[in-house]
Image (cartoon, rainbow, N blue to C red):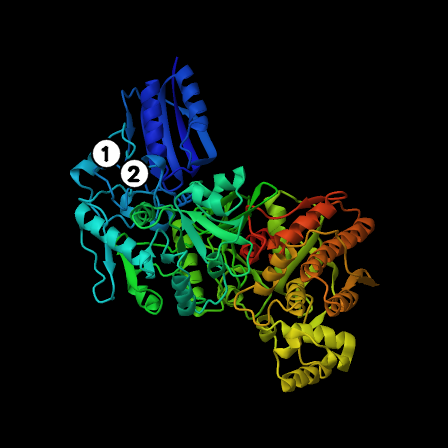
Amino acid sequence: MKKRISLHIKGVVQGVGFRPFVYNLCQKLNLSGFVLNDPQGVKIEVEGEAKKISRFLKELKTKAPSASYIEKIEKKEIPLKEEKKIFIKESVFDKEKSVFICVDLSICDDCLKELLSKNNRRYFYPFINCTQCGPRFTIIKDVPYDRPFTTMKKFKMCKTCLGEYEDPSNRRFHAQPNACFCCGPSIKLIKDLKNRKVERISLKETKKILEKAASLIKEGKILAIKGIGGYHLCCDAKNSQSVKILRERKQRPTKPFALMVDDLKVVEKYCFLNKKEKGLLLSKERPILLLKIKKEEPWMQAIAPQQKYLGIMFAYTPLHYLIFHFLKKYQKEPILVMTSANKKDFPLVKEEKELDQLKEFADYYLIHNRPIYLRCDDSILRVFKNKEIIIRKARGYTPLFLDFKVKKNILGCGAELKSTVSFAKNNYLVTSSYLGDLKNYANYQFFLETLAYYQKIFDFKPEIVAYDLHPNYLSTQYALSLKDVVKVAVQHHHAHLVSCLFEHGLKEKVIGVCFDGVGFGLDGNIWGGEFFVLDRKSFLRKAYFKYFGLIGQDKAIQEPGRISFYILYHILKEKVFDLDLEFLKSFKKEQLKLFSTLIKKKMYVLTSSCGRLFDCASNLLGLKNKVTYEAEAAILLEMVAGDFKGKKSRFDFQIKKEKDTYIIDWEPLFLEMLKEIKRKKNISEIAYKFHYTLAYIIKEICCKLERDCGLKEVVLSGGVFQNLLLLKETVKILEKDFKVYHPQKLLTNDGGVSVGQVVVANENI
């Protein structure tokens, strides 16, 4: 018996070879009908024997392209049309836009094989791609995903490429970025920026450019190389002089650089690598993965000073692989620094007209003429308990679509650091890639660009806008400037924790522990060492670290000795001046006297920030007096603590109760720590002890809240929990008595705040 069904497939089904897959499946099963892209996904009508249609529906789910994700299938039976064939029809534009956009995909094995095969017409072609790989998100201007709506519109396919595009048996059947030397983008190597126009070039000319680029890297030059989502600054990782020059030019004295390799054996030689980590390195997303160093080599100190981890990613574009191919003429195991090409606190450079920003950094520029529509940085991950934890969500992981039923269209404007934005509409929530820190106006412009892009691509008009309480955040000021929308202020740490609740599907009350650097509190102080009893709608602050002062506000974050001075002056008063500690020597006597005067006059900002307590501990141990990148002092404390192999112990601390709230007094902790420093105890033991004490404090407070409130689930969030040692000890110590959750797919740092804002707003309307 024959039947005909209509299907509407929603999810990540455009740009992943889904229409060709449906076409070929229908051919195999002798079904007729059509398939097309529309603004909401893929529409299919198929007709044939009922048994074959049942098989079609089964294989539609089980054998769909690996890069696809079916979120929903709407199905209905319709009258027969008696067609003889299956067709791919032209896309239609008659519906509200809600398609899930495909992420950018690393080069697949088939394309890589062709890239390096002399007899292939795309031999050494830097832009080889197919339906299973290549740029997607960063080249899409609008939906449906068809070439005219991408930055490939200006490249008209040659006869051969068009033949592949129209051939159902070809891997490039309906591959929108399909191109070759005859019709597609080209590369160009320039030293100065006078002529940035890229002309079409041959294989021979391409080879010359690649040979030259490799020889320049070998000579120690720094190249700006255009990738999928923007430019990288690249140099030979083992050439410490090159790395030193790059650091000086970028004014980046100690922040680790990301590395790129093209051979797994190189990673295994220098880093520990388990099965999960290997899978992530070689995944289609190709993130930067933080891997523990096996044995330190001299060149590593220039890459990641005082670190025990290297950030490594695998080559993910054809151009990357070609650079490695030509470098192997000079080096057996090339390793490249591949760091984001931008001025400090500016967005990633993506266009040739922006290259002037890189003049002080790069010696040469390897550019191309395939435009990047939306800039997108590399993602950063690490593995904990065999599960991936995302630290920066960008290329390969965004846009991220999540099931979420909302009453109205909601926009979450995020925080100021590690900014993201999130949108909720109909039955899904989408969160953006990493946008940087909005303190810089250029990043704020990127924030506005991203908002405009998502509003266009999803026909999104916010009815409700959720924002952070901090009045000085540009994201907050943007939200407050909007007209004809309902405005919902969401406390920073509540948003952090609710993001984690949402990720794990938690809807009832839980204990929330949120440790970070800064978040505006309900009392006008800076919070950051918080224990809440909360659900998605509201929270009660049940415990926090006793307030302490930030002398000079943000200056205290850059110079953690100011925090140390406040802490010790609070405990010891004038006796602090008699101490023989490294951090005190980093200030002039007049400065220290001024600090004491400011403390007496209470001229400081109050905070409960656990992140700042980590800075203080690091500073007291002489690890860092001046911070050059976010969380540097705390990271060094974690690295030093990782060296300790002895018996676990903890510092003393006090918990006082005022009305219904517990206050954690840090005085005994730092007093005991100071005694151990004076006795010249091993600093790795002191650093470990600090971590373990924090984990123990978390357990003590959670046990008290369990007794008070009867709750057995604990949610951990906030940037401090990016510290793997603290997370490990906390989870281990809590798991005996509680069910513990922490962010994995969503972000524990401020990148997760926009998701939490949307969820809280949805509960409060």
- Viewer-proximal residue among 764 and 517: 517
Give whichever of 686, 81 is nearer the camera. 686
- Report helix, strand or loop for mark 2: loop
Amino acid under disc 2: Ala
Left or right, residue 616 beside residue 328: right
Residue 274 falls in image quadrant: top right
Q: Residues within 10 Å of mark 2 (few under 14, many from 20)?
A: many
Above or below 116: residue 764: below
Which numbered disc covers residue 175? 2
**Which percent across, then down, holds residue 299?**
46, 57
The residue tagged 1 is 164
**Secondary structure of the residue carrying numbered label 1:** helix
Residue displayed at 33% across by 34% down: 110
Residue 373 in view, yes or no = yes
Give percent across and percent down for residue 278.
Answer: 49, 40
Question: What's the CA distance linking mark 1 and mark 2?
Answer: 9 Å
Whole-percent x, y for residue 115 in the image: 28, 40
Tell me what residue is drawn at x 45 percent, y 32 percent.
Answer: 74
Q: Residues within 10 Å of mark 1 (few under 14, many from 20)?
A: some
Q: Is residue 627 left or right of residue 225?
A: right
Residue 6, percent from left and from top: 39, 28
The mark nearer the N terminus, 1 or 2, is: 1
Looking at the image, residue 370 sits to the left or right of residue 395; the answer is left
